[in-house]
Image (cartoon, rainbow, N blue to C red):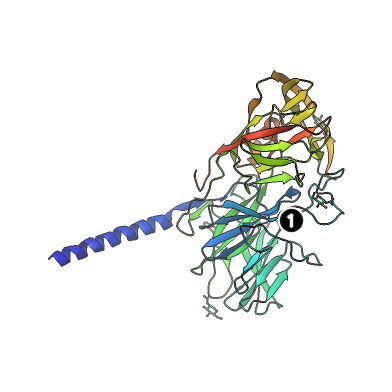
Amino acid sequence: MEHFRDTVATVKKLTTLGLLALGAVAQNFTNPVLYQDLADVDIMRNGDAFYYSASTMHFSPGAPILWSFDLVDWEYSSHSVPALDFGPQKDYNLSGTSAYNKGIYASFFNYNPKTKTWYWASAPEGPWKKSSTLNFCYYDCGMLIDDDGTIYVEGLRMYTRNGSYYILSVHPMDGNIILKGSSPWGPFQWKWLIHNAGSNLIQGFGPPAQGGLVSLADGRWYHMAFINGFPGGRIPVLAPVDWPSDGWPTVHTVNGAWSKQYPYPLTPHAVKSIVGTDNFASLGPQYEWNHNAGPSAWSITANGLELRTATVTDDFFMARNTLTHRILGPSSTATIKIDYSKMADGDRWVGVARDGSSFKVLMTNNISMNSNGWKTDNKGTQIASASISGGSIWLRTKVNVLPRAQQGTFQYSTDGVNFVNRWRYGVFNYATKAKGGSVTMRSFAIDGTMQNNPA
Ligand SMILES: *[C@@H]1O[C@H](CO)[C@@H](O)[C@H](O)[C@H]1NC(C)=O
Ligand SMILES: *[C@@H]1O[C@H](CO)[C@@H](O)[C@H](O)[C@H]1NC(C)=O
Ligand SMILES: *[C@@H]1O[C@H](CO)[C@@H](O)[C@H](O)[C@H]1NC(C)=O
């Protein structure tokens, strides 16, 4: 009898566990998985961890690596490129000329388990180092490490599964296609991976474009692509892939469309949230500089992040040492607290100016750069100012980067009290008279709603 009761209890416990497990798997995630500008996804798995590499153009350090344990909740881990230094021809140091919109595009990475080597580099947590140069340009290329260890670099993302070779390509504004062959050298045939399905994910955004495929340990596959919508950026969306025995994969659609929601691929695994307050115990991998920061332009002190003026200019776009953080969409608030008491005469810091011995908070409107040539075409107009004293100030910006709200966003964001570029918050600091001044950022706080991975 005793034994029998135990058995019933055990069965009950198992049933409860079974239901809990089912419940966990049935929890949905929401697309986009992370509402931040993380363009040109490359994605891979090593063991239980997934890694994501993105483009950064003229921001430095370049090509952030994010990691996740469930493909939905992502945390910044490191950067592949510690500084932008690709020879003398482009000025990533903002010393007289600039390299806006150049730099890092469509990075790829992979891990070779046989040699325990990561490409780009030596370890995913970084730091990474440059070990070789590809002496040719494959547009948006990818890397396949075959089961026998042979490495292929293709013009596009390349995969192998069940004896076949696959190449993933974007078919602009239409969907993504997959090519399949029995050898890495072809010949290949092609079919749609996803076609005309997904432009409803966010109204005003395009359909999912360029991305990557990734396998789970249990053999299921997922497709991560990005959707493009100004000024929110190029943001990642995820969907399961059906891969039937004919060997042709397709994105799993719901009523013919890339769905806004799917069940979590794996048990949800929360990671460090984008939302929250950073007191700058270190400079985390969620930040990047506009071009390379000056080598002695910043440091972490007991009071926070000290930013020293690195350029004498009246042109924000030519000032080194602008710290940036991707905007969290669709709407969020960024609040910074700074100590401005060590600013020098003539210094400009976000919304604070020092002239002589007086400090002002100012609003500068309409600072702009021409995207056809990437030159400054408007240094801005000061539209309001007020005297301040006391040495500390909090500045706050609310942005809404939904495509339909962008007009309002830019009116608000270019007010000079805080600086908002498309896709990024920025904190700048430059001298108009002489270097020597500094400010200390005490904190940087992001407040907003995470669709997944709530804080
Ligand atoms: C940019 O600055 C870095 C470090 O200060 C230096 O090593 C590099 O040579 C500079 N690049 C150019 C093109 O001047
Ligand atoms: C692998 O391919 C063979 C045909 O070559 C097929 O019969 C089998 O179902 C495939 N396996 C998987 C897991 O798709
Ligand atoms: C903003 O700058 C553009 C040119 O860059 C100019 O045409 C426009 O009149 C400016 N608007 C204001 C409000 O200053």
Q: Is residue 221 above or below residue 28?
A: below
- Front one among 215 and 340: 340
- Front one among 121 and 327: 121
- Front one among 53 and 155: 53
Q: Residue at x 65, y 62 (%)?
A: 176
Tell me the element at label 1. loop
Locate residue 44, reporting x and y percent: 60, 63
Q: Residue at x 78, y 41 (%)?
A: 320
Q: Is residue 307 above or below residue 45?
A: above
* Placement of the N terminus among the 4 image quadrants: bottom left
Q: Is residue 293 visible?
A: yes
Locate residue 416, reporting x and y percent: 72, 29
Going by the numbered disc 1, the residue's amino acid type is Tyr
Q: Is residue 422 visible?
A: no
| The quadrant where residue 96 appears | top right
Q: Residue at x 69, y 46 (%)?
A: 288
Relative to residue 125, is residue 57 drawn left or right?
Answer: right
Q: Residue furthest front?
A: 302
Q: Is residue 381 above or below residue 228?
A: above
Locate residue 360, reporting x and y percent: 72, 22
Relative to residue 293, is residue 248 drawn left or right?
Answer: left
| The quadrant where residue 294 appears | top right
